[in-house]
Image (cartoon, coloured by chain):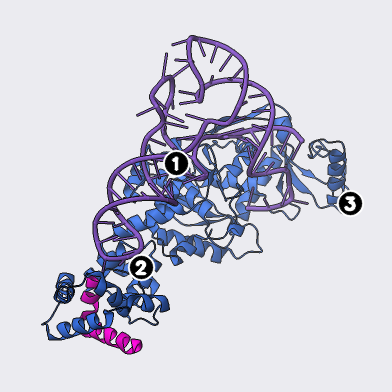
Chain colours: A blue, B purple
Amino acid sequence: MIVTRFAPSPTGYLHIGGLRTALFSYLWARKNGGKFLLRIEDTDKARNSQEAAEAIVKAFHWLGLEHDGEITYQSQRDDIYAVYVKQLLDEGKAYRCYMSREELDALRETQMANKERTKYDGKYRDFEGTPPEGVESVIRIKAPLSGEIIVRDGVKGDVVFRAEDILDDFVIARADGSPTYNFVVAIDDHLMGVNEVIRGDDHLSNTPKQIIIYEALGFDVPKFYHVPMIHNSEGKKLSKRDGATDVMAYKEMGYTPAALLNFLVRLGWSNGDQEIFSMDEMKELFNPKNINRSASIYNTEKLDWLNSHYIKNTPNQELAKMLEAYDITIASHDKKEILLDAVKERAKTLKEMALLVSEMINPPASYDEKALEKAFKGEAVEVLNNFVAKLSSSKELHLPSEYHHVMQEVVDEMGVGFGKIGQPLRVALLGKMSGPGLDSVMAVIGVDETIKRVKSTLALIK
RNA sequence: GGCCCCGUCGUCUAGCGGUCAGGAUCCAUGGUUUUCAUCCAUGUUACAGGAGUUCAAUUCUCCUCGGGGUCACCA
């Protein structure tokens, strides 16, 4: 069974890059009937892990990505890690190092001055004497001094590292006894049964170290897939400074989960020329072998397009429900079908859609000056007066086409073009020159409200 | 700087020795629309550069250039 995981460090919220690797991991697990696990890497005790975990779960929930099983918190596993530290110590695969910070710093400075690679020199690797006084020891692993470590990566291919280029006896437990990242990652992945790791390629250079741990502990090395980074417009790693990296911010901006997920799945992954993927299609078609090798630049143009695509193709009932998050309650509106149909084709986001709806069902809060001036030239007042008269005398109207018919009658009787009624009427109803079809607007608000809005505009003109 | 990864339209990408280098988005133009938007049609734009290998290179190899990542008692 394929077991994947998402293992964020608690930065407070789920960001776009993290979401994409989470999505890939999720899809790959689902496609294979496997498991998708969540582990919070909260060994940095200064932060509140519970809050961060909740933010991530909340975002997952919004997007419909559910993880399997309980969440694993690294902060609660010190006892487990300690067992493995002891094991390596007992087996002579790790050792206590008594080099002080000052001594280490000095060593590094010398190496830098000599233009050598900075690395621990192995002073205590085979130390057998009396430890120096007053220095807390750290625990280092005995890393291979020569040879090659090969990362068999599903995206990059085999990546070969030479031990002498990149390794030294790195620290696996700090002076205070707490274990370090590369050490716990290997242990946790193994213990959780993770056998396929999909993560950002900024981890590629960590991987040899983790492989050393796996091998020292006698664990199977998982299959790795290092996904290329998402860059900002400057071509650098996407970071919080770039704005709009919080996944939940996309909810606030009015993006739908379907659009965001579709957008992200196509960033660095493809299935031929296909652009639109439902969740079911993603689960069926996703395969990490089609992950791209190069980094991509984060640019939301396509997200906008996808979002409007999904809005257009979402049933009205669902849209009505989604709009509730943007303070629009129309579930019980008797004309909600007409209302939503009029508006869903012209909104890029749910937020825009909410605004459009509100502009329709509420009288204009203000009138665009230029629009008033432009629309109310010539016989505009007369046209609207005739329109009001005809509306008042007509029987109940319901459909947009019925309103359209009344408009048509007015212009026909006056012998003027359709534009003569369209412009002033639009300004009267919406306060501006653009917007949904007038017949729909009127059908939604009804005859009385239509007359009311026209009359108050006419009063304004005088 | 060492090590590693990457390099096809502005952007997301297809391509896996022979293609008019395809799609999407964006942009522009035209059409539809009482407006705006939608929708439809058309169009502009790309193989980083140089050597090889080959009958033939975007595709394989090497070099150069460019970009990125990573080098902690952070994760």
Residue A96 percent across, percent down from the top left: 77, 44
Chain ID, mark 1: A
Alpha carbon separation for disc pair 2 and 1: 30 Å
Tell me which secondary structure the magenta stretch mostly adopts. helix
Decide: marks 3, 1 in contact (CB < 8 A)?
Answer: no
Residue at (34% x, 69% y) in the render: A434
The numbered mark, 3 or 2, whose residue comes first in the sequence reads 3
Relative to residue B16, is residue A400 depicted above or below? below
Alpha carbon separation for disc pair 3 and 2: 70 Å
Residue at (20% x, 72% y) in the render: A416
Residue at (63% x, 36% y) in the render: A208
Q: Residues within 10 Å of mark 3 (few under 14, many from 20)?
A: few
For disc 1, the marked residue is A269
For disc 2, the marked residue is A353
**Residue projecting furthest to the left:** A395
Residue A313 percent across, percent down from the top left: 28, 57
Chain ID, mark 2: A
